[in-house]
Amino acid sequence: MSQPAPKRGKPKSIQGKMFDVHTALEQLKDEHLQCRDFGHSWRDYTARWLPKERVYDVVLECTRCKGKKNRTLSARGERLSTSYTYQDGYQIKGAGRLDQAARDEIRLLSVTKLVGGKVTPIKRRRTA
């Protein structure tokens, strides 16, 4: 059975230039594409108490894309700030916030790469 063609979003106009999200997504590394599809897989990286500021400085690292999540927590555990540091190539320069059509493309590209470019139909169970 042939694979359905991914639904392509409309090219965006950014600062007067046309931007093709589909082309940009196809150029992402597999681990970046999977993190955009599944979400990051955060694991402990470093944590330390900063007595002068009276805060915890916590850094988590994604096991797939190696991006970092930096959190500052109060002495009571309240989240004071969160920021992210991504590896080169993760962010799509000029795309801005991705719309639903682009997110749909992310899921399709991710799953087709996982199954080796082939989509296997789901076998349905017979009902009596």
Image (cartoon, rainbow, N blue to C red):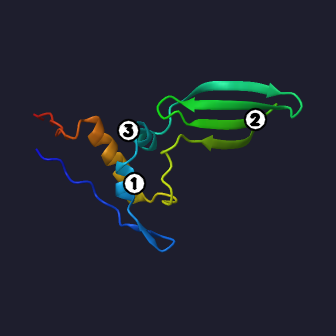
Q: Residue 73 got which mark?
A: 2
Q: Please tell me how crowded label 2 is: few (under 14), some (14-19), or many (20+) other residues with Cα within 10 Å.
A: some
Name the residue that disc number 3 marks. 30
Q: What residue type is labelled 2?
A: Leu
Marks 2 and 1, how far apart in space?
Answer: 35 Å
Residue 97, how many percent across, how many down?
51, 58
Q: Quadrant of the N terminus?
A: top left
Residue at 39%, 56% (x, y): give it.
102
In three-dimensional space, the C-alpha distance between marks 3 and 2, rounded to whole angstroms, equals 32 Å
Cα distance between the residues tagged 1 and 3: 13 Å
Q: Position of residue 53 (x, y in %)?
A: 86, 34
Q: Do the residues labelled 3 and 2 touch (CB within 8 Å)?
A: no
In the image as oriented, which residue stretches furthest toward the bottom?
Answer: 16
| Residue in the foreground of this view, choosing between 47 and 94 | 94
Q: Which mark is on residue 24?
A: 1
* Front residue of this view, candidates 72 and 11: 11
Which sits earlier in the primary sequence, circle 2 or circle 1?
1
Say left or right for 23 vs 47: left
Amino acid carrying mark 3 in the image: Asp
User: Which residue sits at x=66%, y=43%?
Assistant: 83
Q: In which quadrant of the rendered view does residue 12 lie?
A: bottom left
Marker count (numbered): 3
Q: Nearer the viewer, residue 107 or 50?
A: 50
Q: Is residue 108 left or right of residue 43?
A: left
Left or right relative to 127: residue 57? right
Residue 93's disc is: none
